[in-house]
Image (cartoon, helix red, strand yellow):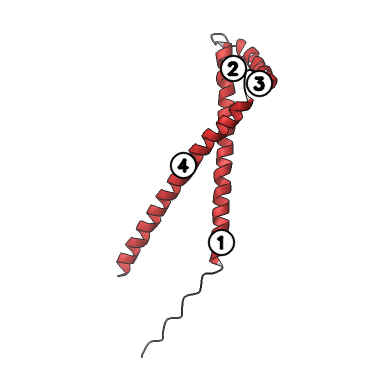
Amino acid sequence: RLKNASGLFNLTRNLGGAVGLAVINTVLIDRNAFHYARLAEHVQWGSAEAQTKLQNMTLDFQQNAGLDASKAAISKLSGMVQQQASLLSFMDVFYLLTALFATLAIFVLFIRKPAEPGGGGG
């Protein structure tokens, strides 16, 4: 009987871990796309800050021979936006997990102690 309980516990633990990781990964991907879109709204051709940053990076890349400086600068700027979107999405997942575990910690206070086992007959 104990062997069956151990197997059931391991199954539940593995299944819970797999589902948890799938949920975390889904949230991470969705929030990354959301944050990338939000950040990309501010990095447009009409934005003075974006134009200044792009011009400075283009000048930096022009010093390297063999590079198309404007393409390299656009690629670098896109990578910077992607990096910040990833950071924000990891922060969202961290906040989500913090809220989950804080909520579960409150429920721990309501768990009753198991009853003492009855004494032996002998």
Disc 1: CA contacts within 10 A as few (<14), some (14-19) or many (>=20): few
Mark positioned earlier in the residue sequence (1 or 4) = 4
Disc 2 from disc 3: Cα separation: 11 Å
Q: Amino acid at mark 4?
A: Asn
Q: Determine whether the residue tagged by mark 2 lies in a helix, strand or loop.
A: helix
Disc 3 from disc 1: Cα separation: 45 Å
Q: Determine whether the residue tagged by mark 1 lies in a helix, strand or loop.
A: helix
Q: Amino acid at mark 3?
A: Ala
Mark positioned earlier in the residue sequence (3 or 1) = 3
Q: Which residue is mark 2?
A: 73
Q: In terms of image quadrants, where is residue 119?
A: bottom left
Mark positioned earlier in the residue sequence (3 or 4) = 4
Image coords of residue 103 (percent x, y): 56, 58
Image coords of residue 70 (percent x, y): 58, 12
Give the residue at x 54% y 35%: 34
Q: In terms of image quadrants, where is residue 3?
A: bottom left
Give the residue at x 34% y 66%: 5
Q: Which residue is mark 3?
A: 50
Q: Determine whether the residue tagged by mark 3 lies in a helix, strand or loop.
A: helix
Nearest to viewer (mark 3 / mark 1):
3
Q: Amino acid at mark 1?
A: Ala
- Answer whether labels 1 and 4 touch (C-beta < 8 Å): no
Image coords of residue 15 (percent x, y): 38, 53
The answer to whether residue 83 is visible is no
Nearest to viewer (mark 2 / mark 4):
4
For the residue pair 53 and 60, the one nearer the viewer reads as 53
Nearest to viewer (mark 2 / mark 3):
3
Q: Amino acid at mark 2?
A: Ala
In the picture, the disc for residue 25 is 4
